[in-house]
């Protein structure tokens, strides 16, 4: 089968803006293209063969997408290790083409039995298998069905149906009006939570060193009238918003996170890694809609409609 050079438009069309899109579309596309671009086993193809060069270039570019995307997601360590090894082999092969020193490579290939599968292709198939395994493992963890049935057991001062779940750490006084609970499984930044700030690698790296207890820590004795004290304590601060399918008697299924996003990211990462339960709850300091800029709220509310459809689509896949 002849292959063609993947255009920038085709590469850009691979959905990879986030882990969810990557699982839904990107992996399937990359798997298909990796399969199509496996190196021909026909050793009579000389190094000058343009099709082999195209295969190499396509594979290198596809693996650039794969390694860039997986670098920030848990459960992809084995994929990255194998992908990195393949990329090194492909780059070495590309260098051989570019320098014209292909004779040694071709002789080495001819030494293989014609029935022996090319080592690079074996690695490519292994990576496709790992991608499938990763997809099957991670997808059920990130899916939260449409609606807010999962919030019924999370305390929130605005919803009397949840008062029986008041956490023991909260005294039954005024402070109970300023904190609410979130399940760790709700912290997916591409489905049910919205982050006000972008990630910084230095802060993310620091959170990786923290214990579960440190990541969960919330100071309920903070002076709620002192902005400087609030900033100094750095509690996770957020609010819940209802989606179109949510039962208004219970807390909404969407979470706007104003502060503590590096901590919530690390908690969610550990959940995906199987280190903690997604049912584990964290106590969060409640804020108001007025704590967010109008443009953020406008865009987020539009995005909720997109995420409702995405959650419906994901439910069909598990």
Image: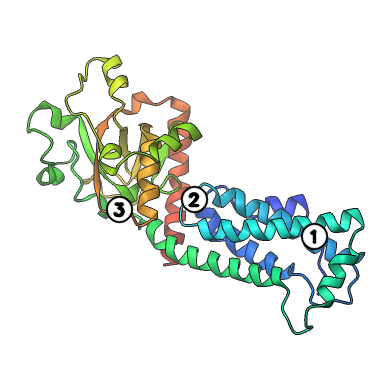
Q: Is residue 230 above or below residue 282?
A: above
Q: Which residue is mark 1?
A: 93
From the image, state whether disc 2 or disc 1 is nearer to you.
1
Q: Give the image quarter of residue 119.
A: bottom right
Left or right, 298 with respect to 57, comes to: left
> Mark 1 packing: few (<14 Cα in 10 Å), some, or many (20+)?
some
> Mark 1 falls on what kind of element?
helix
> Mark 3 falls on what kind of element?
loop
Taking depth in this image into account, of 230 and 216 the one nearest to the observer is: 216
Marks 2 and 1, how far apart at CA: 29 Å
The residue that appears at 79% across and 73% down in the rendered structure is: 40
Q: Is residue 233 above or below residue 130?
A: above
The residue that appears at 60% across and 58% down in the rendered structure is: 26
**Residue 305: image location, x then y, percent:** 45, 47
Q: Which residue is mark 3?
A: 276
- Disc number for residue 158: none
From the image, state whether disc 3 or disc 1 is nearer to you.
1
Left or right, 224 with respect to 107, comes to: left
The residue that appears at 65% across and 59% down in the rendered structure is: 85
**Does residue 74 show up?**
yes
The answer to whether the residue labelled 2 contacts the one labelled 3, judged by CB atoms less than 8 Å apart, is no
Q: Which residue is mark 2?
A: 73
Task: Pick the quarter of the image with the C terminus.
Answer: bottom left
> Mark 2 packing: few (<14 Cα in 10 Å), some, or many (20+)?
some
> Mark 2 falls on what kind of element?
loop
> Mark 3 packing: few (<14 Cα in 10 Å), some, or many (20+)?
some
**Residue 2: image location, x then y, percent:** 83, 71
Q: Closer to the N terminus: mark 2 or mark 1?
A: 2
Q: Closer to the N terminus: mark 2 or mark 3?
A: 2
């Amino acid at each position: 089968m002849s292959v063609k050079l993947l255009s920038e438009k085709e590469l850009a069309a691979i959905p990879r803006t986030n882990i969810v899109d990557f699982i839904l579309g990107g992996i399937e596309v990359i798997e298909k293209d990796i399969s199509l671009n496996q190196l021909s086993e026909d050793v009579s193809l000389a190094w000058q063969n343009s099709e082999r060069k195209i295969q190499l270039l396509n594979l290198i570019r596809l693996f650039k997408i794969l390694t860039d995307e997986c670098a920030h997601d848990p459960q992809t360590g084995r994929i990255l290790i194998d992908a990195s090894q393949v990329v090194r082999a492909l780059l070495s092969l590309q260098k051989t083409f570019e320098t014209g020193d292909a004779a040694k490579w071709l002789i080495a290939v001819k030494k293989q039995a014609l029935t022996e599968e090319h080592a690079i292709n074996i690695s490519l198939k292994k990576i496709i298998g790992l991608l499938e395994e990763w997809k099957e493992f991670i997808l059920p963890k990130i899916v939260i069905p449409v609606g807010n049935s999962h919030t019924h057991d999370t305390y929130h001062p605005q919803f009397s149906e949840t008062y029986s779940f008041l956490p023991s750490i909260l005294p039954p006084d005024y402070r109970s009006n300023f904190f609410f609970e979130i399940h760790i499984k709700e912290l997916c930044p591409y489905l049910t939570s919205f982050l006000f700030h972008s990630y910084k690698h230095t802060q993310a790296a620091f959170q990786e060193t923290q214990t579960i207890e440190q990541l969960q820590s919330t100071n309920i004795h903070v002076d709620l009238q002192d902005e400087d004290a609030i900033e100094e304590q750095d509690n996770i601060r957020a609010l819940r918003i209802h989606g179109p399918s949510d039962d208004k008697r219970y807390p909404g299924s969407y979470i706007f996170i104003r502060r503590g996003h590096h901590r919530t990211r690390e908690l969610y990462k550990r959940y995906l890694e199987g280190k903690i339960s997604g049912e584990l709850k964290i106590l969060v300091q409640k804020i108001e809609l007025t704590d967010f800029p109008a443009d953020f709220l406008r865009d987020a509310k539009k995005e909720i409609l997109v995420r409702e459809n995405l959650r419906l689509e994901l439910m069909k896949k598990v």
